[in-house]
Image (cartoon, rainbow, N blue to C red):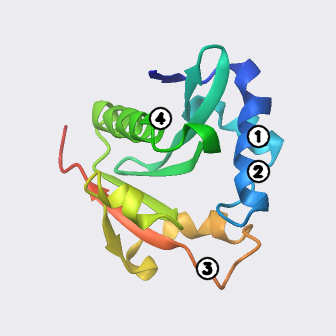
């Protein structure tokens, strides 16, 4: 298995995968149009020809990005696909010179194994809150905020 950039024909599968977990209340739903608009953010993992996992690195500013929409089909969980995706996102952030990566999640333990640390949501920059206004859980967000500091890589 390896993480690779998503292709246009992956988007419908990413949509199904992400919204499967959103329907279970484990992550936020994503509209198909949003996924197409942000296709270049996505990495995927395949098992043979089947897309089994996805994650996105969404850039907010010159020094800030979010890892979002991390999803792994249930039968492939705990087999390293999620780790491959997180590592790919962190490496891409590093190569772009982005210093801080954050995530909002219901699975903080997963991210903490990569060096993310929990922070109060109010510590996150205000520029991220624009997307929160579209969230069905706003303003009662129950996700955990975590940050990963790459430091200055420029």
Q: Would you name the residue on which mark 3 appears?
A: 141
Residue located at (58% from left, 22% from top): 46
**Badge 4 vs badge 2, beta-carbon distance below 8 Å:** no
Q: Quadrant of the C terminus?
A: top left
First along the sequence among labels 4 and 2: 2
Mark 2 and mark 1: Cα distance apart in space: 6 Å
Number of the front mark, 3 or 2? 2
Mark 4 and mark 3: Cα distance apart in space: 27 Å
**Image position of 109 with respect to 76: above or below:** below
Number of the front mark, 4 or 2? 4
Mark 3 and mark 2: Cα distance apart in space: 18 Å
Mark 3 and mark 1: Cα distance apart in space: 22 Å
Residue at the extreme front of the image, as rendered: 75
Residue 30 shows in the view: no
Can you tell which quarter of the image residue 79 is in? top left
Task: Tell me the element at label 4.
Answer: helix
**Badge 2 vs badge 1, beta-carbon distance below 8 Å:** yes
Q: Does residue 6 appear to the left or right of 103 in the view shown?
A: right
First along the sequence among labels 1 and 4: 1
First along the sequence among labels 3 and 1: 1
Q: Which mark is residue 15?
A: 1
**Image position of 115 with respect to 1: above or below:** below
Mark 4 and mark 2: Cα distance apart in space: 18 Å
Number of the front mark, 4 or 3? 4
**Badge 1 vs badge 4, beta-carbon distance below 8 Å:** no
Q: Which mark is residue 81?
A: 4
Task: Tell me the element at label 2.
Answer: helix
Q: Residues within 10 Å of mark 3 (few under 14, many from 20)?
A: few
Q: Would you name the residue on which mark 2 appears?
A: 19
Location of residue 1 in the rendering, given as x and y in whole percent from the top left corner: 46, 21
């Amino acid at each position: 298995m390896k993480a690779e950039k998503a292709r246009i024909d992956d988007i419908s599968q990413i949509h199904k995968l992400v919204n499967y977990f959103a329907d279970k209340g484990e992550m936020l739903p994503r509209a198909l149009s949003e996924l197409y608009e942000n296709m270049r953010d996505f990495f995927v993992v395949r098992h043979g020809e089947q897309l089994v996992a996805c994650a996105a690195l969404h850039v907010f500013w010159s020094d800030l990005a979010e890892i979002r929409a991390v999803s792994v089909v249930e039968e492939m969980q705990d087999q390293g696909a999620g780790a491959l995706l997180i590592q790919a996102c962190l490496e891409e952030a590093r190569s772009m010179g982005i210093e801080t990566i954050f995530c909002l999640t219901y699975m903080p333990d997963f991210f903490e194994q990569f060096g993310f640390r929990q922070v109060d949501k109010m510590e996150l920059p205000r520029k991220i809150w624009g997307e929160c206004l579209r969230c069905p859980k706003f303003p009662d967000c129950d996700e955990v905020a975590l940050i990963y500091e790459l430091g200055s890589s420029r």
